[in-house]
Every structure is written in C-alpha cells, then in structure tokens.
Amino acid sequence: MREVAFDEPGSMVRWTEVPGPEPARVFVHGLGGTGAAIFGDVAGDARLGRRRTLVLDLPGHGLSDRPPDWDYSLEGHASAVARACTAAGVTGIDLVGHSLGADIAVVVAARNPGLVGRLVISEANLDPLPPAPDAPRFSQRIVHGGEAAFVESGYRHILATVPGWAPTLRLCDPVAVFRSARGLIAGTTPTMRELFYGLAIPRTFIRGEHGEPLLDEAGLQAAGARLEVIPDAGHMMMVDRPEAFVAALARALKG
C-alpha cells in the first residue's frame, strides 16, 4: 500500500501497486466502491499483459482518508488521482475508470496533458443530471434527499436493502459518498462529455447492454471514441460478465 497527501491537512489517498513494464495502468473504481473489490481480479488478468499497475481507493472510500470538510467533487477526486500518479512517477498511463471513476478519469485526462496515454471508461455519466427521488441512478436519488438525511438514514437504508452494494459501501464514509454523488451529477465546466470528446488520445467507452442508457452514440463515434457493449450485462459488467469485460478491456488496451 502506497499513499500521498491530497489536501492541505495531509489526508492520504492510497493505492496498491504491482511492478511491471511501463507505461503503467491505473484503475479508478466507482461510487461507494473500493479498488480491490471492483478491479482486483481484472487488473491482474493475464490477458491484459504484464504492466506496472496501480489500483486506487478514492478519497472517502476503502483505505483512503475521509476528511469531513473536503468537497469530494469530480475536480477534487481528479486532483487526488493525479497526485497519486505523480507520487508514483508514472506518465503516459493507461487510465481505466468505472462509473464515478470513469468521470473522474475523463477529468484527469483533460486537466493533466501528457499524464494519460489511453483512456478507457465504463458506464460513465457524461452529462449533468438533476437530483430525483425515482431516478435510475443511485447518485441522483442520494442527492435528492440532502446530505443530512443521507448521513442520518439514507446510507444505512442502502446498506440494509442493496446487498450487492453493501460489502464495499460499508467501507466508505457516508459524507464522502453523498458529496461524491453530488459532484457526479453536477459534473464539470465544460461538461464531461465535452471534455471526453475533445481529448486527442485513444479512448474507449464500455457499457453493459442492460446498464445505463447510452446517449449520443453518433457523437461518440464522430469524436473518434471506440464503443464496446458487453452483452447480457448491467452496470456492474465486471461482475455480470467478467470474461467479456476483460476481453473488451484487452481490445481497448491493445498495442
């Protein structure tokens, strides 16, 4: 486990690392997840080839610190990921992000020219979204009730009613989860979609056939991004169809 400070008081973002040839691969998990749970098996799959590999826990998640006064915005998370890469001495990386981690990865690539050589994002939300109590995305539902309500009861409600999420969510700070969800649906300026389309590096967008709706497929293709669809998979495609997900990731990282 390695670490580096991501804020002025010295809160630490942490990651595990496997040695290998560079350019390195960096994996960024989604909301309420941890690096090992989401990408542990994927990152070490032999079909991806041996590379130096970093698997991060985002601030407020897993083994990273959880300062109560931090904003947990996309920009903040992206800065923490970039600091980890700087501390590790890696550049020209293959950056892989899922869900919240996908949006963070877009911001990392856009704000740090030269750091990312190839970008692979899965189930990303590339557009601002409103808070909504019945929305398909958990991030919208979490933010709708407000931070105090989520910390007081919403967090425990998800732990009790969404068993597939509970094992990693319980390792995350409720304030961090709420503010990360708020940052995710608020997005960035320019939008994540505009940032993603404007990148001049190889990019791949992976989605589950039954995952989040795909918007502007024509725009993705016109921007030169590769699209991979995992059949019979939902949002958590690395759980639903791990073999197919690794195969798609290997194609995206080929060369």
Image (cartoon, helix red, strand yellow):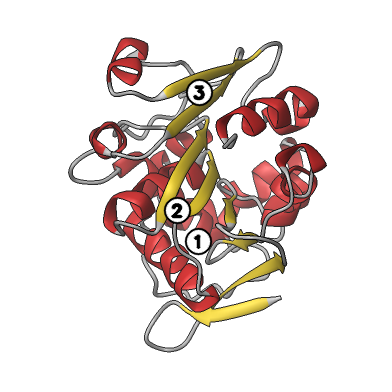
Label 3 belongs to which residue? Answer: 136
For the residue carrying disc 2, how many other residues have a C-alpha within 10 Å: few (<14), some (14-19), or many (20+)?
many
Gap in Å between the C-alphas at discs 1 and 2? Answer: 6 Å
Q: Quadrant of the C terminus?
A: top right
For the residue carrying disc 3, how many other residues have a C-alpha within 10 Å: few (<14), some (14-19), or many (20+)?
few
Q: Amino acid at mark 1?
A: Ala
Gap in Å between the C-alphas at discs 3 and 1? Answer: 21 Å
Name of the residue lying farthest toward the bottom:
9
Q: Is residue 166 above or below residue 221?
A: below
Gap in Å between the C-alphas at discs 3 and 2? Answer: 17 Å
Which residue occupies 50% across, 36% down?
121
Name of the residue lying farthest toward the left:
190
Q: Is there CB contact under 8 Å for labels 1 and 2?
A: yes
First in sequence: mark 3 vs mark 1: 3
Label 2 belongs to which residue? Answer: 180
Residue 172 visible in the snapshot: no
Label 1 belongs to which residue? Answer: 176
Which residue occupies 58% across, 58% down?
24
Q: Is residue 155 above or below residue 198?
A: below
- Where does residue 161 sit, x and y in percent of width and height? 73, 36
Q: Amino acid at mark 3?
A: Pro
Which corner quadrant of the image does residue 192 belong to?
A: top left
Q: Is residue 149 above or below residue 18?
A: above
- Where does residue 27 sit, x and y in percent of width and height? 60, 52
- The kind of secondary structure element at disc 3 is loop
Q: Is residue 210 left or right of residue 176?
A: right
Seen from the viewer's position, the closer of residues 101 and 23 is 23
- The kind of secondary structure element at disc 1 is helix
Which residue occupies 37% across, 16% down?
215
Seen from the viewer's position, the closer of residues 164 and 214 is 214
Which residue occupies 70% across, 67% down?
16
Residue 187 visible in the snapshot: yes
